[in-house]
Every structure is written in C-alpha cells, then in structure tokens.
Amino acid sequence: MNALKAGDHVFFRHPEHSWLCGVVESIVKGGIVCVTKDSLRREATQNEIITIKNPEDVEPLYGESLNDTPDDLLDLTVLHETTLLRCLYMRYMNDVVYTNIGAIVVALNPFTFAIPWYKDSEMQKYLNAGRSLSVSGMPSNLLPHTWAQAHVTYYEMVDSQENQCIIVSGESGAGKTEATKIVLNYLGVVSSLNGSKLEQEAARGVGEKLVACSPILECFGNAKTVKNDNSSRFGKFMKVKFNAKHVVVGAENIKYLLEKSRVVSAAQGERVFHSFYLLARAQGSMARVLGLEHEKQYTSLSSGGTMNNSEYNSEKDFNDVCRAMSIVGMTDVELISVWRVTAAVMTLLNVRFLPEEDGCSIDPKTMKYTKKAVQLLDVCEDDLVHELLTSTRALPDNEFALKKNDVVAAVDIRDAMCKHLYDGVFGWIVDRCNDLCNVENDGNWIGLLDIFGFENFNKNSFEQLCINMTNEQLQYHYNLHIFKRDMDECRMEGVDVTDIKFTDNTGCLKLLTAQGGIFPLLDECCWFGGGTDLGFLEKVVHTHESNSFFKKERVSGETFCVRHYAADVTYNVFGWVEKNRDTLKDSIKSIVRASGDRVIASCLPAPIPLSERKKGGKAFTVGGFFVIS
C-alpha cells in the first residue's frame, strides 16, 4: 500500500459499520486518524473521528471504484473487500438483491416478495433465453437471479446427461429455504417447456405437491431463534428427478440431524418447534379432541421466555398445516396420530420427579401428565413408570441388576424418550412426503442441498458446533473448487499467483475432525465409561491449546473458542457427552413399539438383539455421523 498522508481519501474499517469512506486527518504514533465522510451510509455518524491502529484496515479510495455496481463482482474496477461490500450494499439499497461471482450467485434476503423485477411474471424472460443463458454469459436484458442458476444447472444436466447439484449456503436467516423454493419452482417450469400437455400438467402437479410438503416440514422442523422467526433446525438434501425427456417427475427428501435438544427446551428469546404452539392453540379442534390443557400449563413451551412469533403462531396456521397434511396423502387417522405424538411429548415433559432415600418417585402433582402421555401414546402405564424410575445394569455371566434412578437419571430418560419420539415422527412425516413426491426413475436428478446456516449465538452448544463444522466443510469445498484449482491452473500456465491469498480453513477442519480433534475426543469420552463434559474440555485444551484455530476462554471454566472461517465462536460444553451419545433405553423402544397406534409404534426402531451386537464395538455418536456425512 502506498504511504498515506493527511487529506487522502480512503476506505477505513469502522468498528461498528465495517468499511466506510473517509479522509485521513493525520498520521500519529497510535495509528491513522480518519474522519467519516460517507453520505451513502446514513446509519453512520458523519464527521466521526476514528483512530485506526492496523494499517491494513485503511485502503486508498479510487474515484472510479466508489460507485461501481456491476452485475458480476469479478467485473469490479478494484477488487477488494471494501469495493465488494460497497457494491453489494448499493445494489441492495436499490432493491437489486442478486449479484454474480462468476458461476456463483450471491443472494441478500430482501424480506419482501414485492420487488417488481423479481415477481414470477418476470420468469418468462429467463425461460426464453434458452442456451444463451450460460455459466460464461448472461443476456444484457437479464439481471442475476436464482432462476438463472437453476436454468444453467438444468441445461448442464440435459447436455451432459449427468446429475447436478446446487448448494444453498449462508448463515441462519439468510433466506436459504426460500431460495430453494424458488429453484424448485423454476426447475418444474423450465423442464416442462418442451413436454406434452400431459407432461406439463404432471410437472406442475409435482411442484404443487412439493409446495404442500413445505409448510408441514417447516411446522415440525423449524423454530424461532434469536436471528430468524422460521429457522430450519434440520438439514435437507432433495433430489429433483427427471424422466428421459428431462421433465421433472418427482422428488425425494433426505433429512439430516434434527436439533433434538429443542424438543425439550429453547434458549432465551427462542421457542421450541412450531408444532407444539400450533397444537396448543388449536383449542377449537385438535387440542380439544386430545384433551390438552391451556398452553401456559406446558413448561417446555415457555422455556425460552417467549411464546409468540411472526410465523406459525395461530390456530389458523394449524389448520393450514393440517390441510397440507391431507394434500400429501395423510389419512385422518394418521394426522391424529402425528398430533398425538406431539401432544404426548409436551405432556411428558411436564412430569417431575422427587428425590427419595434410595432413588426417586414421580411427583404426585404431575402424575396426571404421566397418565395423559400414556393415554396419548397408547402404551402400558406400569411399564413406562418402571422404566423412568429404574435402570438395568449388566453383570458378568449375562446377569443383570436393577438399580433405582435418582432424579437426574429419571429426567435424562424422560427427555431422551421425548427427543427420540419427536425425531421419529418427524422422520415418518418426511417419508410420507416422499411417498407422495418420490418416484423410481432411471433419469438424471438435480440435488438441492439446503443445510443449516453458520450460527453464532450468545450461548453456543454442541448443536452449533455440528452445524458450523458442516459449514466449514462447505467452505473447504468452495475453496477447493474456486481458489485452489484455479490457482493451480494459473501456475501451470505460468501466471504468478504469489500475491493472491485466501483464508484456508483446512487447519480448522483438522482441529474439528482429524485424529485427536475435538469430535474424536468427544467420541472417546462417550465410548469409555466415566466421561464427563469437563473431562472432555480438559482433554481438548491440553491437546489443542497451541493450535492457531483454537482458543481457551479464560472467563469461563466450561467454554472454548474455535476460530471458524466466518467468525470466532465460543462454545459451552455443558451436556455435550450426553448429547453426543444420544442414547435411549431399549426397554423404552419396546414399550413404544408395543403401542396400539401404528404410526406411534413405528416412531422408534426395534432394539438390536444382544446376540447381534459387536463385542467391543464403538457405539454410534451424533458427532461421528456429522463427520462422515
């Protein structure tokens, strides 16, 4: 960077507003003193004086780059973080929310569907473009759009006769699920352009079925978080399937880890899953049929300190979801069964336990909730109470000893049962949606990966590390294909790329997943008896305290920090060992599978017989699943 002097126009990194325009007032021993001069950024205080200590946080301002807003960021006159962010900001403030980066499209959530040039009536312009719309070029009359991405991907599948994939990534609340819906809609339309009238109607029918599935999956798989009133708390990979004529004929959903801890409770300012609130508020219909109490009586619903939301909040929303469930083919009996599981979970979580000298007992004041849950699940009350209050310990020579549970153990069993029941019924719902939308087909497919966004809350736990590790993997994939391979190609052609730098997150992935990494160390604590949360933390700190991607937080004895590609995130390890084990007593599985309700009985898998279990085998863990997925 050229030496700066007083009076120079610059971009400088503001501690609150990122990069702003300003003027250098003076160069002092403590840094570069800048005065804010940026009328475009109305949220910033004009003429504010800021001293910038790091010289890399001040960049010369070139006049031609100040108002540069190309459709493709690769066409910026000056390519730097400052000009890139300013370009996106100016486009966004003019209601232009899509911008290309070569073959990638950046989408900023407009929080509205009313922008004229993004309404469905504009889609025809993209459809008419045919093969003139490609990765290497876009007709001048078209703006960047998710439609264009879907268009190009579709024709690449047609021309190559190979399967394709679109990755939709971004932080929580960025609009990934809505972007996925836009892609789905476009694929249905573009694929039927050359089909017969019958095929066009069938393609539209597939689209309508997928639209019907959306509110159901959102109701049972989404929740309010501090950043997003309708945050997906599960990952989804959808295969959109095409026939030999490349007309869409069906789709298959594959779900990834549901955030099961949210079944039991929510963090401050958040809610548990939408479904619980909708059911509790269906006082004119399902809640009355199932004999539920007022919503305020259910402790899990108020665990986050808030019970209202801008979406999925009323009895009308409940009725809309039920109509969608009927459209996807659920019978009235199945629909009631699904809501019975939901009701049983929120009811069972009201059961409390009292300590006794040699174990615990169910608080008589909450025994009515035990009886209600048993009635809803259609299972044996005596068997369930027995399994909540006692545990069986294996002894040598295939003998077993009965042990009375203390309050902590009883609560763990209750919570595990609720989490697995809800996860089971959610899986059943996904399968039912697939029954409606999926087809056996030999044609190609386009995969849509709608995965959890990067998360950084005031308090981050095991779920956030799993989510952020997944995003690290996606970032690595992006780095590999966009930076590393392009730079290797440049080197082969004799182009000097010495000065080109990018954030390589390989070290962070190794910290998380390699042998001796955070996830393997957590698995060890789960596999070998006596593992504790603080013992796990001690191992992590001892192993990685010198790792540049790791930082031990001194302010707390139960946290550590990972320097992710997107941000430094502090994690609290409380409850991690149990969350990673994700165990449920086989006897609980047997009780539920004996239910007289077919749907409820299928919510939990059958126990694995002792004769089929591998001796010394390492048990499945949640973290292990994420690492290999």
Image (cartoon, helix red, strand yellow):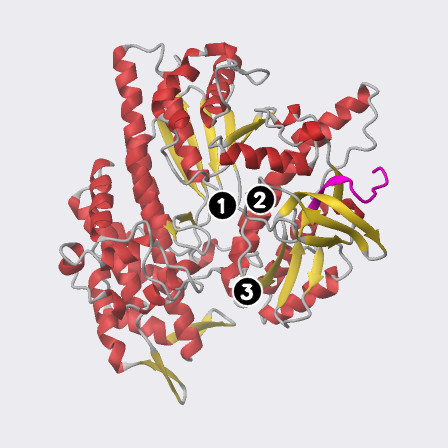
Measured as percent of width and height from the top left, residue 206 is found at: 30, 26
Q: Nearer the viewer, residue 459 or 97?
A: 97
> In the picture, which quadrant includes the N terminus?
top right
Query: Crowding near pointer 1: few (<14 within 10 Å), some, many (20+)?
Result: many
Answer with mark 2 or mark 1, whichever residue precedes in sequence: 1
Q: Amino acid at mark 3?
A: Val
Q: Is residue 66 above or below residue 218?
A: above
Answer with mark 3 or mark 2, whichever residue precedes in sequence: 2
Q: Nearer the viewer, mark 3 or mark 2?
A: 2
User: Mark 1 = which residue?
Assistant: 452
User: Mark 3 = which residue?
Assistant: 577
Q: Are marks 1 and 3 in contact (CB under 8 Å)?
A: no
User: Mark 2 = which residue?
Assistant: 471
Q: Secondary structure at mark 3?
A: helix
Q: Are marks 2 and 1 in contact (CB under 8 Å)?
A: yes
Q: Nearer the viewer, residue 600 or 3?
A: 3
At x 18% / y 59%, what residue is drawn? 287
Q: For the residues marked 1 and 3, what is the alpha-carbon distance in whole angstroms?
A: 22 Å
Q: Nearer the viewer, residue 424 or 534?
A: 534
Q: Quadrant of residue 254?
A: top left
**Count of numbered marks:** 3
Q: Which residues are magenta?
A: 1-12
Q: Quadrant of residue 482?
A: top right
Q: Secondary structure at mark 2?
A: helix
At x 55% / y 29%, what residue is drawn? 99
* Relative to 65, 594 lies left or right: left
